[in-house]
Image (cartoon, helix red, strand yellow):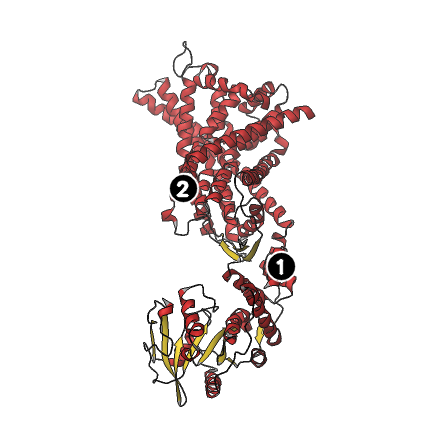
Amino acid sequence: MSSHAPSCHAAETGRSAPVGSPIVAFVGAPNGGKSTLFNRLTGARRVMGNWPGTSVEIGRGSWRMGDRTVDAIDFPGTYSLDPLSPDEELTRNLLVEVPLEERPDAIVVVADASHLARSLYLVAQVAEQPYRMVVALTMNDVAERRGVSVDAVKLAEQLGHPVIELDPRRGTGLESLADALTASLDAPAPARPARTAPEGSDFDRADARFAWIDDAVASAVVESEQDRTKTERIDSLLLHPIIGPLAFLGVMWLVFQLTTAVAAPLQDGLDALFTGPIANGATAGLEALGVAHPLVVGLIVDGLVTGVGTVLTFAPLMAIMFCLLALLEDSGYMARAAVVTDRLMRTIGLPGKAFLPLIVGFGCNVPAVSATRVLGDAKQRILTALLVPLTSCSARLAVYVMLAQTFFPENAGSVVFAMYLVSILLVVLTGLALRSTLWRAMGSSALVLDLPTYQRPQPRLVAQVTWMRLRGFLQTAGGIIVVTVMIVWLLQALPASGGHAIGEVPPTESWYATISSWLAPVFAPAGFADWRAVGALITGFLAKEAVISSWAQTYAVADPSTLDPTGQGVSALADQLRMTFDTASGGHPTLAVIAFMLFLLAYTPCVATLAAQKREIGLAWTVFGVVLQLALAYGLAVLVFQVGVLIL
Amino acid sequence: MRQVLDAITAGATGHRAICEHTGLGPGMVEAALHQLERMNMLEREEIGSACPSDGCGSCGSASTCVAPATGRGPVFLTLRRRTD
């Protein structure tokens, strides 16, 4: 394209200056005021159009400098004569590649004083050609506001070319520019360049140019010491290699503590509503309709109403957590968290961008898996999608809270926090293991350039984000939970052997118990080989949110998940669980419940997550992920229990 | 430029750290980073959002999205390992 483009002297398109007028090229970086200057100088005598034989738009006009008229050409914004785009390629062709006699008679390089060093790179390259050159220094007011003061006279001495300070918007310095250019045009064209082009590799040449630029800037530019902004002062702590990660953990711990503590009374209220007026109303309604058969009542009241109630009582817990996360995001802190975790991401060969799907996974694994599609590299996408299930989603939080209050009432918050630490550790270690065995990803150090300033969170935005996420959680989990609770109720209502009517089956004689009993012995090495514990894991495979309610159904006690955490720890279900784990573990209930919680953390997440994985990474990788998670969960649970028994 | 590259390799993370490491002014550091990016030795990566760049319409999770909505994230430049 550009190789067929006519030179500046040959092209007639857009020429308005008389034939034979000197041609002056205006070049410079984008957004440096070049076109503003060009328009100011040429006024109405300019035309915009594609350069012949190209699709590059160039301005051309006539500039009257006293008695002389100049043919001015406004080249597209360019940072360098080493082109990265068709625009820059045309600029290079017309300024460097064509024979000397075909080139413009002079060049005005528009340099942005507020980004002077960057602008001078083009000046350095033009100076390596035998050109008449004038440097037009713009954005001087912006530079001053940033504490940058440029001595144009000294700069000119260093560059070996005139430097004119001007403001094209206000029209100042234009006469000086005209005078400088007139003097240049009156002088003979230089026989050789003002500076010798450096040799060597591209990097060596660029480095040599920067050395020249550094000398010029050092002699002519004074940058006043900028006081650290409030944001920078805070970042010196929050981005510190040691303080940063500790601060991040502290903030996350606070989030989870507040979530569990504040949600409690709200959950109590919702529970009272569903187990009271709504359940009673449903029963009364079925009786009024004459369909109060035990199976129907059980399915509707114990299944459907209970299931919906369970979903909605999670809402306060999720809403508070989502609200706190939204506050952190809008304040600007989450960007710092991304930086802190980015360093960790890169040690497992993942880009910083993977931080966000993983952090979303702590809310819900389903959208987190979908979010991996923003990773451009397929291997990174698969690796991240495989790691997402190891992030402890909010559904598992409810189970942690219940078990922590039951078995560790004095340290429940810390135990829950420890589960999240283990989750992070599993993500990192599994990522490292997968990277070194399946993929060899590049790990490189990152450089943070641009962080948003801290700001006061906007309540309206926080509320919108919170509602969006809560709605997503309810939509994703709601249907699954309700169906799961109904299925579990049905399995528990159907007798595995004869002798009982449907809906009147002792728990130990139901199909639920039978299936769970088949699997229970597998978990003997982990200390919880009891069908009631194992059955909850089966339920949890469908939906983690339904684990507690399925236990309640199994033990035929009230579901305590809607009570406050302290209440859960002293509920009838808590008593039953203590007995179960104590018996199953042979007198080591603490170890057994820790093993159980670790298994719950690491094993396959809900079927909705699997469906999302299949969509994003395919069936083969999804199956691989299931096998990996089960192996990891089982190995971890057995290891903790067996080693714990040996030590204690 | 070599000084800036050495500073990054040595672990400087951020403009101010590079300035302190190299003794160069902020403007020079900015210019050097810009040139390194142009020369494909640094890769720009924005991690402001987990969302697709072409908006919610193309996202299968749009109806249940829980990704951060504010998009106020950092821009990273990462050293690209040269293959030549």
Q: Is residue A384 visible?
A: yes
Find residue A494 and report its image quarter: top left
Query: Where in the figure is residue B51, as x and y percent of width and height?
Result: 43, 48
Spatial CA distance of label 2 from label 1 is: 44 Å
Q: Position of residue A458 (x, y in %)?
A: 48, 53
Q: Nearer the viewer, residue A359 or A161?
A: A161
**The disc labelled 1 sits on which kind of residue?**
Ala
From this view, report whether residue A72 is shown above or below residue A484. below
Q: Badge 1 local density, few (<14 within 10 Å), some, or many (20+)?
A: some
Q: Nearer the viewer, residue A512 or A258?
A: A512
Q: Residue at x 49, y 17 (%)?
A: A518
Chain-order first, disc 2 or disc 1: 1
- The answer to whether A384 appears left or right of A593 in the picture is left
Q: Residue at x 65, y 49 (%)?
A: A242
- Which chain does the residue under circle 1 lie in? B
Q: In the rendering, which numbered label is found on residue A62?
A: none
**Which quarter of the figure has residue A93?**
bottom left
Q: Nearer the viewer, residue A451 or B43?
A: B43
Coordinates of residue A20 in the picture (x, y in percent): 36, 85
Q: Between label 2 and label 1, give the one nearer the viewer.
A: 1
* Above or below: residue A406 compared with residue A461: above
Disc 2: which residue: B64
Q: Dot 1 corresponds to which residue?
A: B7
Q: Assign the N terminus of chain A to one quadrant of the image.
A: bottom left
Q: Is residue A556 visible?
A: no
Picture coordinates of residue A293, whole percent (x, y): 34, 18
Tell me if A258 is positioned left or right of A29 in this view: right
Outermost left residue: A289
Q: Amino acid at mark 2?
A: Thr
